[in-house]
Image (cartoon, helix red, strand yellow):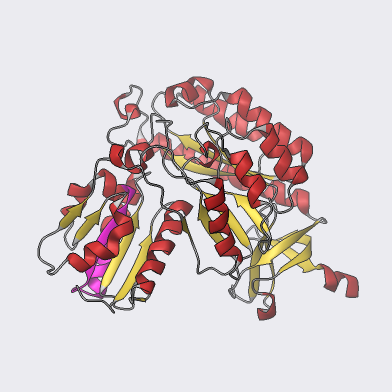
């Protein structure tokens, strides 16, 4: 296929996928392709897929249909976790031209340019055990923040998860190489770097280098105002990491996202998690002891096999009493080739949905209580580059989303604000400190 064509991208799933899509898109532009929006009649579509839930699989099918409506003659390439797990199934989707696995997606341009016809479907993938390389990536396009991939793969094999099958073993490059990637970002307009990966706390895999050593080196980089940790397992979030981020660091923010999955020790064991509830409680208490205003987010799964009403309420009551700020709630869905799919005690879908609803309502209560605890206090906001119905929005260091009457001169700037009140949408009205002084 000839160069100088239009290409569009769509990313499903996590921040890690966004970092990889952005890097692949830059490679296309460097090769002479024009990056365009999804609806701008592109010649090539690249859809980066997720396979954490069944909905992500269905979304892939919907996107292929949508792409073919925009341009029936388009060439459609599917990459990402779903592509590695189910390449033959994807190849059966009407309109798909190429499916690339975990390693092959980074050579996508080479594979496309070898393609001389739209007839048939090309599948290029290797067994996940052979995937050994780490490909550095970071997102760029949103001027305010960048997702920096510091690690890939996972060695944990939780019973509900397909990620090790889709991304392979835990791996990363060296601290020095990772720092060099971050320095590339520091030379742009980006103010905040979000560290992302599959299991970032496993950086170094027990070798001489580790995650604590990495964040200490990243904290020395000039030109970046903030570093944020996207998500870290509680058993890998050591006290020294917490102490450094909250006490000694120049740039790491007081915001932790810590997966829990269940408040029942029995279910945690069935899930094959690497910790019990006591460890999780200890991490939350350690954070709040040092920084009462720190934001703590939680991942939780409902409807896992064997989750009795008593086990669910154990989770609900535990989270209700825990000093956390918000929840990300996932409804368990059966995934092929996972141990959990073979377990007894399957929870009916209607009950799963009811429990999800209960926890999402709890999340809203937790978030509002956290925001209310901040009213009258101050923080530093990074204003985003958009006009949202006459307001400009941004996030503070402890992940409070604030709003202020729109002023284009504020875009991609950081400034001190005072928290005034919470609006009906759950956003915090903020007053710029200089305006408060003038008043």
254 or 364, which is in the foreground?
254
**Residue 14: image x %, image y %?**
45, 51
Q: For the N terminus, which image quadrant?
A: bottom left
Residue 237 appears in the figure: yes
Query: Residue 109: which quarter of the image?
Result: bottom left
Q: Is residue 183 magenta?
A: no
58 or 197, which is in the foreground?
197
The vertical placement of 32 against 148, above or below, is below
Q: How many marks?
A: 0
Residue lying farthest left? Answer: 119
Residue 439 appears in the figure: no
Q: Is residue 79 magenta?
A: yes
**Residue 181: image x %, image y %?**
53, 58
Residue visible at 52% across and 55% down in the picture: 148
Please give the range of residues in magenta.
64-81
The vertical placement of 63 against 51, above or below, is below
419 or 211, which is in the foreground?
211
**Residue 304: image x %, image y %?**
41, 30
């Amino acid at each position: 296929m000839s160069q100088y064509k239009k290409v569009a991208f769509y990313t499903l799933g996590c921040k890690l996928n966004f970092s990889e899509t952005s890097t692949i898109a830059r490679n296309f532009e460097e090769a002479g392709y024009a990056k365009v929006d999804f609806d701008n009649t592109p010649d090539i579509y690249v859809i980066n897929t997720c396979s954490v839930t069944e909905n992500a699989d269905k979304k892939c099918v919907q996107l292929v249909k949508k792409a073919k409506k925009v341009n029936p003659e388009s060439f459609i390439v599917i990459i990402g976790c779903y592509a590695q797990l189910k390449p033959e199934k994807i190849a059966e989707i009407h309109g798909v031209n190429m499916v690339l696995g975990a390693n092959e997606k980074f050579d996508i341009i080479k594979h496309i340019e070898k393609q001389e016809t739209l007839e048939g479907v090309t599948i290029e993938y290797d067994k996940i055990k052979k995937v050994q390389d780490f490909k550095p990536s970071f997102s760029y396009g949103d001027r305010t923040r960048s997702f920096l991939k510091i690690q890939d793969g996972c060695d944990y094999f939780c019973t509900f998860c397909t990620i090790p099958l889709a991304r392979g073993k835990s791996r990363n490059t060296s601290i020095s190489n990772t720092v060099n990637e971050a320095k590339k970002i520091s030379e742009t307009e980006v103010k905040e770097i979000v560290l992302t990966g599959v299991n970032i706390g496993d950086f170094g895999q027990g070798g001489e280098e580790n995650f604590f050593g990495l964040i200490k080196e990243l904290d020395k980089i000039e030109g970046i105002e903030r570093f944020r940790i996207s998500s870290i397992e509680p058993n890998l979030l050591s006290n020294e990491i917490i102490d450094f981020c909250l006490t000694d660091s120049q740039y790491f923010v007081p915001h932790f996202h810590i997966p829990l999955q269940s408040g029942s020790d029995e279910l945690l064991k069935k899930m094959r998690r690497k910790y019990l509830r006591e460890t999780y409680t200890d991490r939350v208490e350690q954070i709040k002891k040092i920084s009462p205003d720190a934001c703590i987010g939680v991942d939780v799964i409902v409807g896992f096999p064997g989750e009795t009403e008593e086990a669910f309420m154990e989770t609900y009551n535990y989270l209700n009493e825990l000093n956390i700020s918000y929840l990300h709630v996932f409804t368990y869905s059966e995934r092929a080739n996972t141990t959990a799919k073979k377990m007894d005690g399957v929870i009916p879908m209607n009950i799963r949905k009811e429990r999800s609803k209960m926890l999402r309502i709890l999340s809203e209560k937790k978030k509002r209580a956290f925001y209310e605890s901040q009213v009258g206090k101050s923080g530093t906001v990074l204003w985003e580059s958009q006009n949202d119905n006459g307001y400009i929005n941004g996030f503070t260091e402890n992940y409070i989303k604030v709003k202020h009457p729109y002023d284009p001169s504020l875009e991609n700037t950081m400034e001190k604000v005072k928290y005034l009140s919470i609006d009906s949408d759950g956003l915090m009205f903020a007053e710029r400190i200089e305006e408060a002084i003038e008043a």
